[in-house]
Image (spheres, coloured by chain):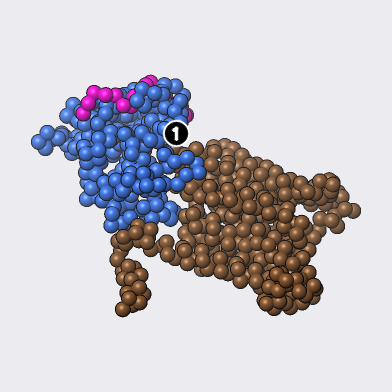
Chain colours: A blue, B brown
């Protein structure tokens, strides 16, 4: 891990509706980092990834990629350095794995060009890094969930990005395929030096595989730090409104949830509400 | 022995899942090439059928000698002046319509997006009717006018569907149907208002190739060939759009720009077809669908197979329409609807229809 900043979010803000906005999102991403963004549903995690990739423009603030504002860069140039694996719904996509991965070369092609030998090297690298040699001519829809996820990761790799963002890469996968994907991400980070930002719901996995965690709540960053610094009772109470016990497995912290504080609070609210109604 | 190995070699190659040549290892590639070749052969046969069939039956060898030596003046005249230009015009019309439909379905992400259904053809038709009735002196500009009409209709649909946020496939198709009926009504209104001049429009409106000859062919040729050539560049754009807007953007693609390119191209082809053959439905809907069932969604194969299939269908149906019911000559548009509608229902019933998103 170096100290070179590759991606900066500065005071990102987005006002969509009174109930949903992004505010004061500021962080720096160092080269070679693995960062996980965690937080409850609707806390704005996916929106932040979309702001970082210029899929949405912020109302104020900016994103710097290698010191340049992405708002002023073309999509092609951005896509050569930074890409995201969105949550994919690919049931209707009728492609072989290889054809899907080939699309990853698009940022390097002019509008009239098709892939050539030079592109093949990047494609072959993506295929071997994700262990898809045996599956590369299979139609995408004939693969299992984990294999499909690997195929999409391979497409992103064919872009030869420096930074890869992943939006819940393990959702809908069983535990062994979840681990397979997480190991793949770790390997890409270690061996190929790709900087990773991902959204994860499994906090124990986030702690195990990330160098740093960013916790979001109500559209803003509430805490950030290493898993060791972050994992404590107050963190789980504040960010997820649960009661949790923290344990340690060698260096890695993990937690076991005990009970939801959300329910107790809403019960209290309901009781309070009844009082108001009966009182009124 | 050597002959045996030559014959057996391709067989043994097929058994290996990992072929040496990566292109060979994709099992669907072979099927796609077979379909493509078959479509080309069918088109060729339909052209021959179109040249030999008619109220005067002319054998293949007579067709040949009529075209080369012009021995038999009457036959030469029939083949060269009547049948050949009509077959060639039908070929371009069919190819243009089918490719326009396939492109439109990609852009609008809706399998029902046929130029005839979503109002693109109606846009071409309205401008064409206005030109024929009000400005008959400028008829040579008809393809261009039809293109402008088709383009405006397509853009109108696109803008309407974008109003109020997301462009869902449903919204696109519904705005298309609204635009279609609006333009259709405008077309009828123009014809009612100028009912004294409507005679000039009627044969065109019925949708057909009756009486189409060399002038029509040279009218459509530049437009259709430019459009079809440009569609080769549309392949990657259309394929990327299939991945969804978000993924396409993450791949560095200018989604709106390539949508616009595909819409213009599709309108260009639909306008070209409408300017010589009037409103012919179903080709742009049925042909891309069948092609998709045969070769899949990859536009690299979908577009050429659709082009060949559309050309085959129109040339064959036109020959059938003018010969099967002799002495009556049906407009090919009507025959296509008669054939196309039940076939389409059959496809729906069979459930084999893959939604091309």
Q: Quadrant of the N terminus of chain A?
A: top left
Q: How many marks?
A: 1
**Which residue appears farthest toward the right when viewing the image?**
B196
Q: Nearer the viewer, residue A247 or B322?
A: B322
The residue wearing badge 1 is A75
Q: Nearer the viewer, residue B26 or B88?
A: B88
Residue A12 lies in magenta, yes or no? yes
**Residue A36 location, x and y as percent?**
27, 34
> Which image quarter: residue A68?
top left
Q: Residue at x 84, y 47 (%)?
A: B137
Q: Which residues are magenta?
A: A1-19
Left or right of residue B45: residue A187: left
Left or right of residue B195: residue A169: left
Label 1 sits on a secondary structure element that is helix
Q: Nearer the viewer, residue A24 or A274?
A: A24
Residue B90 lies in magenta, yes or no? no
Subunit that carries the residue with mark 1: A
**Residue A203 location, x and y as percent?**
23, 37
Tell me, yes or no, if residue B170 can be seen here. no
């Amino acid at each position: 891990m170096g100290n070179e900043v590759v991606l900066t979010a500065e005071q990102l803000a987005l006002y969509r509706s009174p109930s949903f906005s992004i505010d004061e999102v500021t962080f720096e991403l160092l080269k070679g980092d693995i960062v996980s963004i965690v937080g409850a549903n609707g806390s704005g995690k996916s929106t932040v990834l979309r702001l970082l990739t210029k899929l949405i423009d912020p109302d104020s603030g900016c994103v710097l990629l290698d010191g340049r504002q992405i708002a002023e860069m073309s999509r092609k140039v951005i896509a050569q350095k930074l890409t995201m694996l969105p949550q994919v719904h690919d049931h209707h996509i009728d492609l072989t794995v290889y054809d899907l991965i080939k699309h990853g070369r698009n940022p390097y092609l002019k509008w009239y060009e098709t892939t050539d030998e030079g592109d093949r090297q990047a494609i072959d690298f993506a295929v071997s890094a994700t262990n898809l040699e045996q599956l590369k001519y299979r139609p995408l829809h004939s693969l299992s969930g984990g294999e499909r996820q690997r195929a999409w990761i391979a497409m992103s790799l064919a872009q030869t990005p420096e930074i890869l963002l992943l939006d819940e890469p393990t959702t809908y996968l069983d535990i062994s395929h979840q681990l397979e994907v997480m190991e793949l991400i770790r390997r890409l980070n270690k061996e190929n030096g790709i900087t990773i930002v991902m959204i994860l719901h499994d906090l124990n996995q986030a702690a195990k595989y990330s160098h740093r965690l960013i916790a979001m709540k109500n559209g803003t960053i509430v805490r950030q730090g290493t898993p060791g610094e972050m994992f404590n009772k107050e963190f789980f109470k504040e960010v997820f409104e649960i009661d949790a016990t923290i344990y340690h497995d060698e260096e890695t912290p993990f937690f076991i949830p005990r009970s939801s504080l959300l329910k107790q609070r809403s019960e209290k609210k309901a009781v309070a509400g009844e009082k108001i109604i009966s009182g009124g | 022995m050597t002959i045996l190995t030559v014959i057996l070699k391709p067989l043994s190659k097929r058994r290996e899942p990992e072929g040496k040549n990566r292109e060979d290892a994709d099992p669907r590639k072979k099927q796609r090439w077979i379909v493509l070749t078959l479509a080309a052969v069918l088109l060729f046969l339909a052209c021959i059928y179109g040249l030999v069939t008619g109220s005067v039956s002319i054998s293949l060898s007579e067709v040949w000698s009529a075209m080369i030596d012009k021995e038999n003046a009457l036959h030469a005249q029939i083949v060269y002046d009547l049948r050949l230009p009509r077959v060639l015009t039908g070929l371009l019309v069919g190819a243009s319509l089918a490719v326009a439909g396939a492109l439109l379905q990609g852009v609008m992400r809706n399998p029902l997006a046929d130029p005839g259904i979503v109002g693109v053809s109606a846009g071409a038709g309205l401008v064409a009717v206005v030109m024929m009735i009000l400005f008959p002196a400028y008829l040579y500009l008809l393809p261009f006018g039809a293109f402008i009409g088709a383009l405006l209709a397509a853009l109108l649909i696109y803008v309407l569907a974008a109003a109020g946020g997301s462009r869902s496939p449903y919204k696109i198709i519904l705005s298309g149907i609204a635009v279609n009926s609006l333009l259709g009504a405008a077309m009828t209104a123009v014809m009612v208002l100028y009912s004294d001049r409507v005679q000039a429009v009627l044969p065109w409106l019925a949708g057909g190739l009756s009486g189409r000859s060399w002038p029509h062919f040279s009218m459509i040729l530049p437009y259709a060939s430019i459009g079809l050539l440009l569609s080769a560049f549309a392949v990657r754009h259309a394929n990327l759009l299939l991945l969804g807007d978000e993924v396409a953007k993450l791949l560095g693609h200018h989604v709106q720009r390539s949508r616009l390119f595909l819409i213009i191209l599709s309108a260009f082809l639909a306008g070209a077809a409408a300017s010589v053959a009037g409103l012919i439905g179903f080709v742009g809907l049925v042909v891309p669908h069948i092609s998709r069932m045969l070769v899949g969604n990859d536009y690299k194969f979908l577009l050429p197979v659709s082009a060949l299939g559309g050309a085959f269908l129109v040339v064959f149906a036109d020959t059938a329409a003018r010969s099967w019911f002799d002495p009556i000559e049906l407009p090919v548009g009507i025959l296509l609807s008669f054939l196309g509608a039940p076939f389409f229902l059959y496809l729906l019933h069979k459930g084999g229809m893959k939604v091309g998103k």
